[in-house]
Image (cartoon, coloured by chain):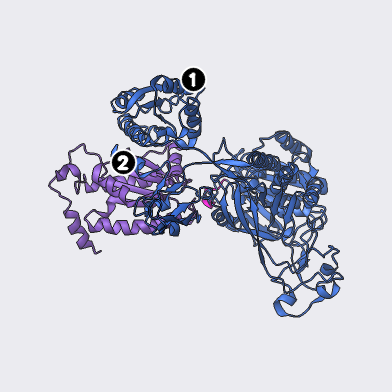
Chain colours: A purple, B blue
Amino acid sequence: MSDTITEKIVSAENPSLEAPSDWQPVIIGILCNWCSYAGSDLTGTSRLQYPPNIRIIRVPCSSRVDPWFIIKSLQTSADGVLISGCHPGDCHYIAGNYYARRRFLVTKELLKFVGYHENRVQFSWVSAAEGPKFAKVVAKVTEDVKKLGPLHKYRKEDLL
Amino acid sequence: MARVGVFVCFCGANIADFVDVNEVVEETKKIKDVKFAINYKYMCSDPGQGLIKQAIIENKLTSVVVAACSPRMHEKTFRRAISEAGLNPFLLEIANIREHSSWVHQKDKKSATAKSCDLVRMAVAKSIANEQLHEISVPVTKRALVIGGGIAGIQAALDIADAHIPVVLVEKSPSIGGRMAQLDETFPTLDCSQCILTPRMVDVATHPYIELIPYSEVIGLDGYVGNYKVQIKKKASYVNFSSCTGCGACSQKCPVKVPNEFNLGHDKRKAIYSPFPQAVPNKPVIDAEHCLMLTKGKCGICKKTCEKGSIDYDMKDEIIEREVGAVVVATGYELYDASPYEEYGVGRFKDVISSLEFERMVSASGPTNGTPIRPSDGEIPKNVVFIKCVGSRDEAKGIEYCSKICCMYTAKHAMLLHHKVHDSHAFIFYMDIRAAGKGYEEFVKRAQVETAATYLRGRVSKIYQKGKKLIVRGEDAQIGQIVEVEADLVVLATAVMAQKDNPDLARRLGISYDKYGFLSEAHPKLRPVETSKAGIFLAGCTQAPKDIPDTVSQASACAAKVCGLFASDTMKKDPMISHIVQENCTGCQNCIRVCPYTAIVTEEIPIAPRSTEMRTVAKVNEGVCQGCGSCVAVCRSFAATLSGFTDKQIINEILAI
C-alpha cells in the first residue's frame, strides 16, 4: 500500500476528537509465555524502566493469538497493541511463531485496509534473554501510539 | 455467581515501595465479583499461604487472584496452596505486579499503582472464566538420553545407569572423554586427569545399562516429557566396530599424516585413527576428508592390513531412533579463538600458544611427552608469560562473563612448568585472582610460594619479537608502570565459549539459549539443571563455564532429576491443552495442518445421535498435545479450545482494561 493511500486512511481516524492534555495511551501487550513473557520478566528483574502504558496478557505461544483479540482490544480500550513471540526458529512449540508471523502479516493488511494506522498494531520478537530489548520495544510502541493520539475508530462509545 | 478473593503481596519492599498496595486493595474491593481482598508482606511465605487458605474457606471463594511476582516464579506454589484449601489449583490467576509494574516503573508510583490495579482487574476477570482442570496421566518410557560423553555426560550416564535405568549415551567424536581427557593434572589436588577419568570411561563402556553410541549426533527430537523419540545420526566410520578388535595395525600402516586435533596440531595422526591411546571405545575411524581411498579411490592399505576384515569403504551415515523419557544435554565447551587479539601476535608468532596447547605439552601423553617446548625451535622455555582473561571479561570482544577456570588452571600451569623446568620462571598477567572454591585459594597461594611466579596485575598491550625472544609489554597497575618481560613462550588463557552448534542443537531440542550460546536453565538459582522444556536437563559447561567439581555435581543433579522423573510409571501432565468440541467441529482440518506435534487426528462420528451416517471431525491426542494453542486461533467454528487460555478468558482480560 502506497504512503499516500495510508495517509488518507489515517486522516479517516477522526482528528476532530482532540486528546486531553494529560492523555496517556493504553497499550495491550500479548506475549508468549516462553520467550517474550520471560523477557519481560527479565526486564523487571533487571529493573529496566519503561513507560507504564502497557498491560500484558500472557498466552502460551504467539500462535495462540487470534486476530479477534487484536480487533477486540482496539474496539474497546486499547490505543495500540503489541504482540511479541519467540524469534523465528526459536519457538518453544517448534513452529508456532511461523504461523503467527504469517497470520500477523495478513492481519496487518486487513487493519490497514479498514483504516487503522499501521503503528497501532506492532509485532516483535523478544527472546527470554532480551530484557533490554523488551524495554526498548515497549518504549517505541508507546511513543508511536502517543503520536497517533487516542483511538476513536470503531469504538463502541464513539459509534453510539 | 463468582466469589473471587484477591491477595496483594508487598514482596517485602519490592512491590510495596513502588506501588501503593493499600490503594490496590481498595480499588480491588470495588470490583463486582471480588468478595475478599487483603494485602500481606510475603504472600508466598507460610503465613501468607495460610491467609489465602483461611480466606478461601471462610469466604467460600470460587477463584483466587494473587497479585505478586511473575507466574513463572510462584504459580505452582500458590496453586498448591489453594488446592490445600479444597479449591481446584487451576482456579488461580496471578497478577504480575512485580516484574511488570513495581520493578519497571520505579519512578512513577501513581502510574505503577494504576497499572497494578488494572493488572488485578484483568486477572480477576480471567479467573471468573477459569475452569476446574485435572492433571493428565501419561505413561513414561524409562530410558534416558545423554548427549555428550565428556565428564558431565559420563557422570550423568553412570549415575542414571547405576539406578538401573537404561541410558543411551551419544558422543560426537570417536571416543568419549571430552575436554577432561586432554588435561594433564587437575587443580586443586594435582591428581592426574587421565588416572581419574579413564576408569570411568571404561565403566561407561562396560555398564550393562549404558548403550554407548560414539561418532554420532542427535539430529532430531520429537515428543514430550516421558515420551521422546530421538533421531541419532551415526556418522560413517568406515570401520565395523563389532568385529574390530582395536589392534591398531591399520593406523600404523596408514600412509596419510594429518595434524592431530587432540594435540591441537602439535603432532600428526593418521587418516585412520583413534583420537588418543586410552580412547573408549578403542576403535579407529577413517577421516573421510583425508583418506586416499575415499578421496582418490586408491590405497586400501588399511583394508589389506586388517585381519578381521573390519574396514568397509562403502559405509554410509545411518539414522537410528531411540525412545527415551528424559534427556541430559552435556555438550561441553570450546575455547575462544584468540586471533582477534592482533596485538598478541596470535597466529603470527609460533611461540604464542593457548593454554590448552600448553596443557597438552606438559601432559605425559602429549606431543612432547610432557616437556614444554617453544613450537618455533623446539627449545625448552625458561621465561614463560601467562596472560589471563584473553577474551573473557572483554566487552570489546563480546564476552562479558568470567570463564571461571582460568585463574585456577594458570596457577596450575605455573606449578607444572616449575615441576618440568626447574630453572624456569612464570610471569602471570591477571585482572583479578578468582579462586572461590574448596581448597582453591590455598592452591593459588601454594603455587605462588612454590614457584615464586611473578603475578603482575594489569593487561598486556603488545607482544613483539626481538631476536628469538618475545617481548611482552603490559601494565603493572600496582606500581602504575609499563613493564616489559622477555619471554620464551607466551600462554594465553583463552575464554571458555559455548559450542558453536549449541543454538542448532537447542532448536532441535526445543530449549532456549543465551546471547553467548550457552543453553539456558529454567531458573538461575532454584532450577539450575532443568531447562524450560520438561524432561530436558543440563550438565556442565553447556550451561555456563564451570570447573570439574561443579560439572560433576551438576551431572549428578541431572541424574537425580531423571531418576525422580522415572520414579513412577506414569507422569502427571499439565492439563492446559487443547480440546475439540466435536459438535461444533466442521471437519475443515485447519487445526491438523498447523499442529506442530501432529497431536490432532480425525475421527468419524455420527452426524446426529443414533444416526448411521458419519462425518469427519478432529480429535486431540491428550498425551501428545503441548498446549500451544495454534489450533484454537485457526479454528473457524470455535470448536477448538485451549484449557487455561480459552477465548473467554483472554477476551475477559481485554474487556477488563
Height in image: B29 above or below B307?
above
Dots 1 and 2 on the same chain: yes
Q: Residue B414 location, x and y as percent?
A: 74, 45
SS at mark 1 in the image:
helix
As drawn, the label of residue B547 is none
Q: Residue B642 location, x and y as percent?
A: 42, 46
User: What is the span of residues highlighted in magenta in the rendered image?
Assistant: B393-397
Q: Are marks 1 and 2 in contact (CB under 8 Å)?
A: no
The span from disc 1 to disc 2 (Cα, nearest Å) is 33 Å
Q: Is residue B473 left or right of residue A50?
A: right
Residue B560 among those drawn in magenta: no
| Depth order, front residue of B652/A25 | B652
Q: Residue A36 location, x and y as percent?
A: 43, 46
Height in image: B257 above or below B131?
below
Q: Which residue is mark 1?
A: B47
Say what amino acid the circle numbered 2 marks.
Answer: Ile
Parent chain of label 1: B
Looking at the image, can residue A145 be seen?
A: yes
Q: Residue at x 70, y 40 (%)?
A: B549
Placement of the C terminus of chain A among the 4 image quadrants: top left
Crowd class of label 1 (few under 14; some 14 to 19; many from 20; radius 10 Å): few
Parent chain of label 2: B
Q: Is residue B241 left or right of residue B565?
A: right
| Depth order, front residue of B239/B32 | B32
Placement of the N terminus of chain A among the 4 image quadrants: bottom left
Q: Residue B366 location, x and y as percent?
A: 79, 56
| Depth order, front residue of B454/A124 | A124
Say what amino acid the circle numbered 1 marks.
Answer: Pro
Q: Which residue is mark 2?
A: B654
Height in image: B620 above or below B73?
below
* Residue that lies at the very extreme toward the left in this rendered image: A16
Q: Residue at x 40, y 48 (%)?
A: B581
